[in-house]
Image (tube, rainbow, N blue to C red):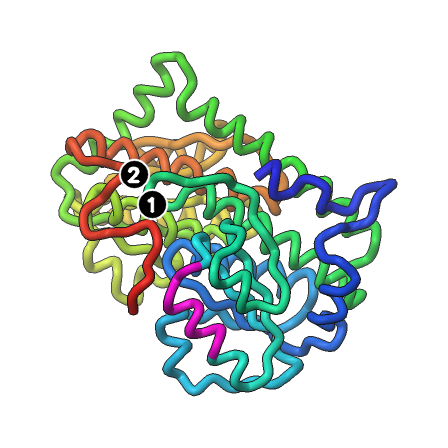
Amino acid sequence: MRATLSGRLLGPESSMELFSEEELELLDLAGIERVIIVACGSAYHAGLLGKGAIERFARLPVEVAIASEYRYARPVGDERTLVVAVSQSGETTDTLAALEAAKGFGGRILAVTNTRGSLITREAEVVLMTEAGPEVGVAATKTFLAQVAALKLFALELGRIRGAVGEGELLKLGRDLRMAPEKVQQTLEMMVGRSHYHDDVLEEAASLFEEARCALFLGRGSSYPVALEGALKLKEISYLPAEGHPAGEMKHGPIALVDEHCPVVAVVGEGFIREKTLSNIEETVARGAKVVAVARQDDEAARRLSRVVLPIPQAPEEVGAFISSVPLQLLAYRVAKERGLDVDKPRNLAKSVTVE
């Protein structure tokens, strides 16, 4: 994350250096009227977080499409449509096909990838690299966080160019985003420090899944894509069926699954959505759910409603998705290890999906 953000943020004595003048001319960001993010798996969840950032900072409509569906959807667009293709490997067949579909209607193409020289870097007009380094494990963790960082950077740049965000707010948002690596480090220390307390928290949380038949992950706002990603991580490496849902959608169907054998993992979040999320958690507890909450360590309401709280530090709103993702990654890791599974090489999965 530090490498992805380094040198790319607006500072008191520096300008944002995300794209060259030639790249800015190719993208023509001032003339863009619509953004489509195409991606698969974890990159799709990163795209959902990117959508929220772009709509807030640039005030542009954003669609996030699953690449394997987009390619067959007869997509509509023109030269004022920017298509952002997100792929860790840069070789994902469905994402490359979606990119070709976008070229068919004349859309401008930006690729976000972690792999220099990959196919996507040759097909896109402009490339925004994440600097996560090689990720050996099949289930994306650090590359997911780097993609979110890159998309937030892009949202700030788009907002700046379009004049949708003032310079003072840009500086504040830049300061907040610059704190993200440090806050992730703090989260890791809170979760996997050397004291027995940290081991006990993860062990206690993992124990709730010993007799589980499924798991539900809940969140609101930016915590919803985090919940989706947490559910995917648990599925990928523990093989436990898991679903992510907006917390407010529970009563529209998913709450039927809730009982003592279906743990609920709730990303509490901050601000005005926190109270709503706590209310949704309370509804699941009333139906016998064992709840794991991702919340600030001093959040007494979350602690009262939950069996276990996976702690995160106090942080600005723009950092919330980063620090909330880390405990869910560690939870999936611990559940899989308790089941005696290979967390780096889960069955049936490949690091790069190069077939349809």
Q: Is mark 2 on a helix, strand or loop?
A: helix
In the depicted structure, whether residue 169 falls above or below residue 44: above
Depth check: 130 or 274 in front? 130
Identity of the residue drawn at 28% across and 55% down: 243
Kindly identify which residue carries mark 2.
332
Identity of the residue drawn at 25% across and 49% down: 235
Depth check: 105 or 304 in front? 105
- Give residue 153's position: percent from left, percent from top: 65, 52
Q: For residue 255, which quarter of the picture?
A: bottom left
- Give residue 292's position: percent from left, percent from top: 32, 38
Q: Count neighbours of disc 2 (C-alpha within 10 A) and say few if under 14, some if 14 to 19, many if 20 or more.
A: many
**Which quadrant is the C terminus positioned in?**
bottom left
Residue at the top extreme of this rendering: 195
Identity of the residue drawn at 55% across and 86% down: 105
Query: Amino acid under label 1?
Result: Ala
Query: Amino acid under label 2?
Result: Ala
- Give residue 205's position: percent from left, percent from top: 28, 31
Q: Judge whether residue 224 can be spotted in this image.
A: no
> What is the tally of numbered marks visible in this picture?
2
**Label 2 – label 1 distance at C-alpha:** 10 Å
Which region shows up in magenta? 91-100
Dominant SS type (magenta) = helix
Depth check: 271 or 47 in front? 47
Q: Count neighbours of disc 1 (C-alpha within 10 A) and say few if under 14, some if 14 to 19, many if 20 or more.
A: many
